[in-house]
């Protein structure tokens, strides 16, 4: 029984480590898109627009926006947010600000290099999303709101997500956020990319965790046998 508890503890710790690493990877991809300077993802357009108009930092606005989104999702669902959603809200903003301070991460001089940086950023975001979802520690604030609105309205997920991002992108544009070709590339490519990266990440995470599940099952059988 003690072995089973130990395995559960290790398994839980590994899941949270994967979750946190996924958030870090995703944040790095977000910063690569920002530094490429040819358009950002809709939510980042909004955060950057707020930063341009009101100061603070991009990461701080990501946290502030995430807090109110999570609050709205909680009020609509009448349930407390999961720990994963809270950590997502807090850590992504912190990671973005820390990565933005890396001195060698600068906007490239040529358009070709900017496009390459953008594409790499989107792919990195895809793997970050794949990792943190594979850990199954809870959806982020924006996905939490999307899921709640889907349940409340009965609309399909893609319609709710699309509507939210159109509103956010419009607000970001009005705030002078960076809407450009990169924004369009992100909107059309992130779905297929996550569709490719998520199964890969799930397979990797399951491969890492599978021995612990097996040991737990064996320990349970031994305990029952005794």
Image (cartoon, grey):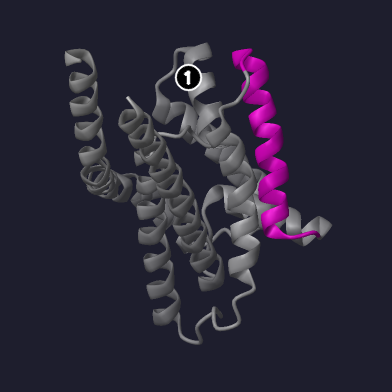
Residue farthest to the right? 54
Q: Quadrant of residue 105?
A: bottom right
The image position of residue 141, as x and y in percent, is 58, 35
* Quadrant assignment, res 99: bottom right
Who is closer to the viewer here, 1 or 113? 1
Q: Secondary structure at mark 1?
A: helix
For the point 35% across and 54% down, which residue is it? 127
Q: Residue at x 31, y 33 (%)?
A: 3
Query: Does 20 sit above or below residue 96?
Result: above
Q: Is residue 173 visible?
A: no
Residue 76: within the magenta? yes
Q: Nearer the viewer, residue 157 or 216?
A: 216
Q: Position of residue 194 (x, y in %)?
A: 32, 46
Q: Which region shows up in magenta? A: 56-79
Expressed as whole percent of the image width and height from the top left, the position of residue 113 reads: 41, 81
Q: Which residue is mark 1?
A: 150
In the rendered image, the quadrant that contains the N terminus is: top left
Closer to the camera, 44 or 95?
95
Q: Residue at x 24, y 21 (%)?
A: 220
10 over 106 or under it: above or below: above
User: Is-magenta flag for residue 147?
Assistant: no
């Amino acid at each position: 029984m003690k072995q089973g508890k130990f395995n559960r503890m290790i398994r839980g710790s590994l899941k949270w480590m994967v979750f946190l690493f996924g958030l870090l990877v995703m944040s790095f991809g977000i910063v690569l898109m920002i530094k490429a300077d040819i358009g950002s993802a809709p939510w980042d357009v909004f955060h950057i627009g707020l930063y341009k108009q009101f100061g603070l930092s991009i990461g701080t606005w990501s946290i502030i926006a995430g807090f109110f989104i999570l609050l709205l999702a909680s009020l609509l669902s009448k349930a407390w947010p999961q720990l994963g959603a809270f950590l997502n809200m807090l850590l992504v903003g912190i990671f973005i600000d820390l990565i933005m301070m890396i001195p060698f991460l600068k906007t490239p001089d040529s358009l070709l290099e900017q496009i390459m940086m953008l594409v790499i950023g989107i792919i990195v975001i895809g793997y970050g999303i794949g990792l943190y979802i594979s850990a199954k520690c809870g959806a982020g604030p924006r996905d939490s709101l999307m899921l709640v609105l889907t349940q409340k309205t009965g609309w399909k997920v893609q319609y709710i997500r699309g509507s939210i991002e159109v509103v956010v992108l419009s607000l970001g544009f009005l705030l002078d956020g960076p809407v450009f070709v990169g924004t369009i590339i992100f909107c059309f490519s992130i779905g297929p990319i996550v569709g490719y990266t998520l199964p890969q990440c799930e397979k990797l995470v399951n491969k890492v965790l599978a021995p612990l599940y097996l040991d737990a099952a064996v320990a349970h059988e031994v305990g029952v046998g005794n």
